[in-house]
Image (cartoon, rainbow, N blue to C red):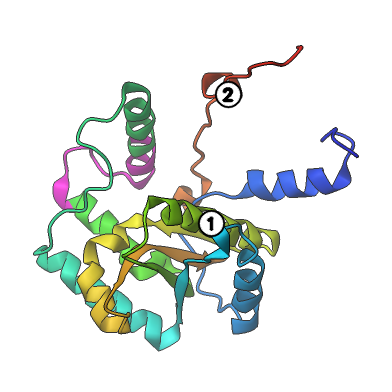
Amino acid sequence: MRTDRNTNPDARVVDSVIRSRRAVRAFRPDPIARHVIDQILEVASCAPSNSNTQPWRVDVLAGPAKSALSNVLKQAHEENRHPPLTHMPEVLPEAMRRRQEAFGAAYYGVLGVPKHDVQQRARVTARNFDFFGAPVGLIFSIDSALTKFSWLDYGIFIQTVMVAAQAVGLDTCPQVSFARFQNVIAEHLALPANYEVVCGMSMGLSDCDSPVSRLETGREPVENFARFLGFDS
């Protein structure tokens, strides 16, 4: 049993793939073949789920289909009639608030958008709905009858999609912003009546020339979020 990550070649490969993954927000338009996405999803379907329920549903969009969804979403975003998306509590725990603010300052700073420029920030948000220029967009949805534990399963699945994509050189960005337009997406994609949008995802090749593609976010050291009990050392 090879438990030393420094001497286990398989562990080094897996670690490299996971560490190289980042949320990319500027993509090249190069098309991605359907069979490549199919293989990524087939690998991701090996993700664990409670009692093997596999609660995921994925709509994969490219070409005119992706453009059509982007157009209706950008229109909905411009009209601004839907309630704001509440994906975090109004008051975040202090440590999380600091990390969120640091990311926002770095992200909008790279784009040259002032903190209080609401119109500019709205235009930046609109880029989500063009999938940041990626050739492939994915919409993940789930049966609304399921509980938070199935949503946990779904999160594992989505992470596995991103890692499987990274392993073949494709970049991704998971995007919760799509959930704001649940009704628009459900109607446009003819989702089953009981399904709700979990998130969207952009997938393709990173535009490495874009400054936003070089944005890096820090990670907390293990000792800041983990407790070890019962170990000898």
- Residue type at mark 2? Pro
| Residue displayed at 60% across by 57% down | 48
Q: Position of residue 168 (x, y in %)?
A: 69, 65
Where residue 156 appears, as percent x and y from the top left, is 54, 53
Start and end of the magenta stretch?
Answer: 105-119
Q: Is residue 115 magenta?
A: yes
Q: Residue at x 27, y 41 (%)?
A: 88
Looking at the rendered structure, which numbered label has been put on residue 221? 2
The answer to whether residue 209 is seen in the rendering is no
Residue 33: give x, y in percent of width and height.
61, 82
> Of 156 and 194, which appears nearest the observer?
194
Task: Say whether residue 211 is visible.
Answer: yes
Residue type, numbered disc 1: Asn
Q: Residue furthest top?
A: 233
Residue on which disc 1 sits: 50
Eyeballing the image, is 71 above or below 179?
below
